[in-house]
Every structure is written in structure tokens, then in C-alpha cells.
Image (cartoon, grey):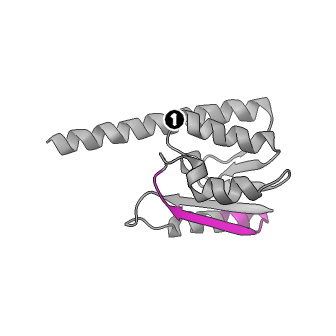
């Protein structure tokens, strides 16, 4: 089964861009999404309290695939993203990220790549937070 996971943080954002990217990616790779899971919630919220955990992590089994636009859709902290990836990889669930062009499976080089992207996502979140705080102070 192929799952497509889409997440935006606020109601003022739309999931259409991510959906379009995934549809285009699947068409180019001969894939068909079996289940779309979209939600509007912050990436700092634990996966178990989001559809990521209550739908995909509960339903997906070995051999399934999860497609998302980027790793930051799974969470905004290094630990959260790594725990989510570990959960999938330990269960032989492949993760494809479109923007990065990586297919992450339970191979050591995939785990190293996943770690690097997760770290980048956390740094990005901290930079955005710092810029927001500075703007609010001004």
C-alpha cells in the first residue's frame, strides 16, 4: 500500500501544493497512492497525536511506502523525525521524500541521510523561530 502524507501548520495554509507535488511524482514514477492522509496541525505535535501516528503508523505494514514532500512534514525536531523514521524503517516501510529525491529504507546509508535531513529540519525550525521572535520584538 502507498500512503501519501501531507501536513500544513495553520488553517491559512493549503495542502494543494503538496498534493500536486506528490501526484506529479507518482505519475513520473508509475506509482498510485492508495491512501491520502492530510492534516492541519503543527509539526511540534507528537506523531501519535496526529494522523501521521493514528492512521499511517497504525495501518502501514512491511512492504508499504509513505510518500511526503520532505522530512519536515514528519516533525520539527531531530528526535521526533528520527523516531518516526526509525518506526517506519524497523517495520520495512519505505519513505520517499520528493524534494530531496531520497528513498529511505532500512540500509545504513539511508539512515545517515535521514539523520542529516532531520538535523537540517530542526535547524530550520529554530532559525524560523528566532526570526519570528526578533520580528515580534521589533
**Residue 64 point in image, percent of width and height:** 81, 55
**Residue 4 point in image, percent of width and height:** 67, 62
Q: Is residue 8 left or right of residue 107?
A: left
Residue 75 within the segment the image draws in magenta:
no
Q: How packed is label 1: few (under 14 Cα within 10 Å), some, or many (20 or more)? A: some
Q: Quadrant of the C terminus?
A: top left
Q: Quadrant of the N terminus?
A: bottom right
In the image, 35 versus 110, the foreground residue is 35
Residue at 79% x, 39% y is 90
How many labels, in total?
A: 1
**Residue 137 point in image, percent of width and height:** 16, 40
Q: Residue furthest right?
A: 63
Q: Quadrant of residue 35?
A: bottom right
**Residue 33 point in image, percent of width and height:** 73, 67
Residue at 59% x, 55% y is 69
In this orientation, does residue 99 appear?
A: no
Q: Is residue 12 left or right of residue 62?
A: left
Q: Is residue 51 left or right of residue 65?
A: left
In this orientation, does residue 32 appear?
A: yes
Residue at 83% x, 45% y is 92
In the image, 91 versus 98, the foreground residue is 91
Q: Which residue is mark 1?
A: 120
Residue 32 within the segment the image draws in magenta:
yes
In the image, 86 versus 21, the foreground residue is 86
Q: Is residue 18 left or right of residue 104?
A: left
Write down the region rendered in magenta.
Answer: 24-42
Q: Residue furthest left?
A: 138
Quick one: SS at disc 1?
helix
Amino acid at each position: 500500500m502507498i500512503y501519501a502524507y501531507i501536513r500544513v501548520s495553520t488553517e491559512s495554509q493549503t495542502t494543494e501544493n503538496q498534493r500536486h507535488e506528490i501526484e506529479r511524482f507518482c505519475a513520473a514514477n508509475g506509482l498510485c497512492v492508495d491512501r491520502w492522509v492530510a492534516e492541519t496541525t503543527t509539526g511540534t505535535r507528537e506523531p501519535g497525536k496526529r494522523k501521521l501516528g493514528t492512521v499511517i503508523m497504525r495501518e502501514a505494514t512491511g512492504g508499504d511506502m509513505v510518500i511526503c514532500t520532505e522530512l519536515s512534514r514528519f516533525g520539527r525536531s531531530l528526535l521526533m523525525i528520527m523516531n518516526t523514521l526509525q518506526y517506519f524503517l524497523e517495520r520495512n516501510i519505505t519513505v520517499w521524500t520528493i524534494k530531496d529525491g531520497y528513498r529511505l529504507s532500512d540500509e545504513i546509508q539511508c539512515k545517515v541521510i535521514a539523520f542529516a535531513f532531520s538535523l537540517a529540519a530542526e535547524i530550520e525550525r529554530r532559525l524560523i523561530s528566532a526570526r519570528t521572535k526578533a520580528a515580534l520584538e521589533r
